[in-house]
Image (spheres, helix red, strand yellow):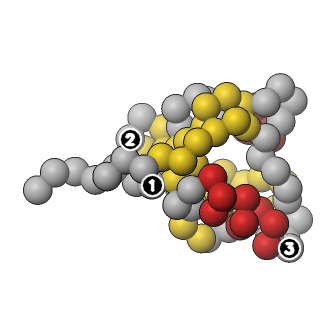
Amino acid sequence: MGSRCPLGALVMSPLPGSQTERLGLKPGELITIYSQQPVLSMVGLDEHIVKNVLPTVSFTFVRMGRSINLRAKKGPLGFEGKDDRTP
């Protein structure tokens, strides 16, 4: 059995002054959970952001193979990204 990489929204470039930049996310990191919901694509992440009604939200991203949990303000995280469809 091969190892599976999680699907999610891949951070390509944090936007200057964005939450992503302030929270320290870096290119190549993968957002896998937003507001306790799995993130399967950039569109899925956008949908979770729009549906969230809380002032802050928790999310999980993968850095060097480790899952890290953070909290952010409601609204866009602010990064250029793409879907990660790595099986």
Q: Which mark is residue 53?
A: 3
Tell me whether circle 1 and circle 2 mark residues in contact (CB < 8 Å).
no
- The residue sitting at 42% across, 44% down in the picture is 66
Q: Which residue is mark 1?
A: 7
Q: Is residue 74 left or right of residue 32?
A: right
* The image quarter in which residue 1 lies: bottom left
Earlier in the chain: of badge 1 and badge 2, it is 1
Q: Which badge, 1 or 3, is on the more N-terminal residue?
A: 1
Q: Secondary structure at mark 1?
A: loop
Which percent across, then down, holds residue 40?
A: 52, 61
Q: Quadrant of residue 13?
A: top right
Sequence-earlier tag: 2 or 3: 3
Disc 1 residue type (three-letter): Leu
Asked whether 82 or 68 is in front, the reply is: 82
Residue marked by disc 2 = 65
SS under mark 3: loop
